[in-house]
Image (tube, rainbow, N blue to C red):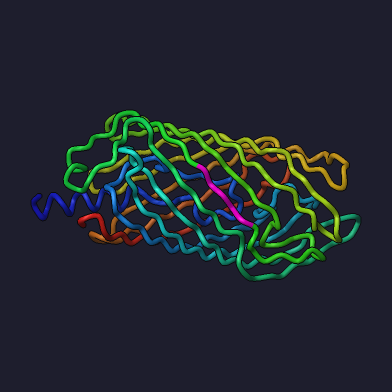
Amino acid sequence: MRCGESRAIGMAVLVGWALTGMASPAGAQDIEPRAYSNAPVGVNFLIAGYAYTTGGLAFDSALPLSDPDLSTSNAVVAYARALDFRGKSAKFDVIAPLSSLSGTADFDGGTLRRDIAGLADPKFRFSVNFFGAPALSLQEFAGFKQDLIIGASLQVSPPVGQYDASRLVNLGTNRWSFKPELGVSKALGRLTLEGAAAVTLYLDNDDFYQGRSRSQDPLYSLQGHLIYSFQSGVWGSLDGTYFTGGRTTLDGELNDDLQQNWRVGATLAFPVNGRNSIKLYGSSGVSARTGNDFDLLGIAWQYRWGGGL
């Protein structure tokens, strides 16, 4: 492979395959274009990002609060690796967020204030493209042209984030969550259409605020992306997501907190050099029945190595 060709391939992989939703504090509300794109086997990605949110709830949209006015700062480190899973392209990634939260919200006739910083719940995910994206070496990837890709993933979030049962608002959730997802990506020249459907499942929190038991129904989500890739390696996307469900039960009593929320956003990614890229992204709550009225702005830097690059 010629040096120029290898560099061009590396640039396309670098800019086109990353974790956009990595800095979003609320996993069910992630908006992530290119989640199921292909990449050469053995390539590693190190991502560092920062996201800022302001407005409504960003960590747990089903908390029994009203008039939340909270801001969060989220520094995130993530690692991803492209894998060969029985001849299909696959990916493993882990996201470790460090967050701070400050602001006020109303609860039970009074106003609560919370200022906290620490570790939020991490995320571990394994994804496989089982149609349209075979596992390829860097040399083989030079001839790959995407058509239709269908893939699936499972994300697991363990309860290791900072948590205090005497406080209503926390960075951690004190419960496990599991998010299986099915994704589709269709290339139409420089335009790519993507969609994904997921459900987030929650185990119970048996040490919720002041020692109560809290359970939550599954939260169903859909997301879609309209992506355009420029010849220079820059790409941009318009993004949207809808999620519904997630009613909670507190000490056996079902709450009136069904979620039916829309978010929209945009992403812009561009190369810096052969191993580095920058991504800018943002999203905003458009319609919220429960706890989604926050704005998010983020930036992520990505470095890649391995796989023959």
Whether 33 is drawn above or below 274: the answer is: above
Residue 222 visible somewhere in the drawing: yes
Span highlighted in magenta in the image: 154-158
Q: Position of residue 18 (x, y in %)?
A: 39, 51
Tell me: 309 left or right of 220: left
Q: Position of residue 183 (x, y in %)?
A: 46, 34
Residue plotted at (47% across, 33% down): 195
Was residue 36 drawn as part of the magenta stretch in this picture? no
Residue plotted at (82% across, 65% down): 166
Q: Give the residue furthest to the front.
A: 86
Residue 193 visible somewhere in the drawing: no
Residue plotted at (88% across, 41% down): 253
In this view, the residue in front, 6 or 237, is 6
Query: Which SS does the magenta portion mostly show?
Result: strand
In this view, the residue in front, 190 or 129, is 129
Number of residue marks: 0
Residue plotted at (52% across, 57% down): 23
Q: Give the residue furthest to the left.
A: 2
Q: Position of residue 231 (x, y in %)?
A: 23, 43
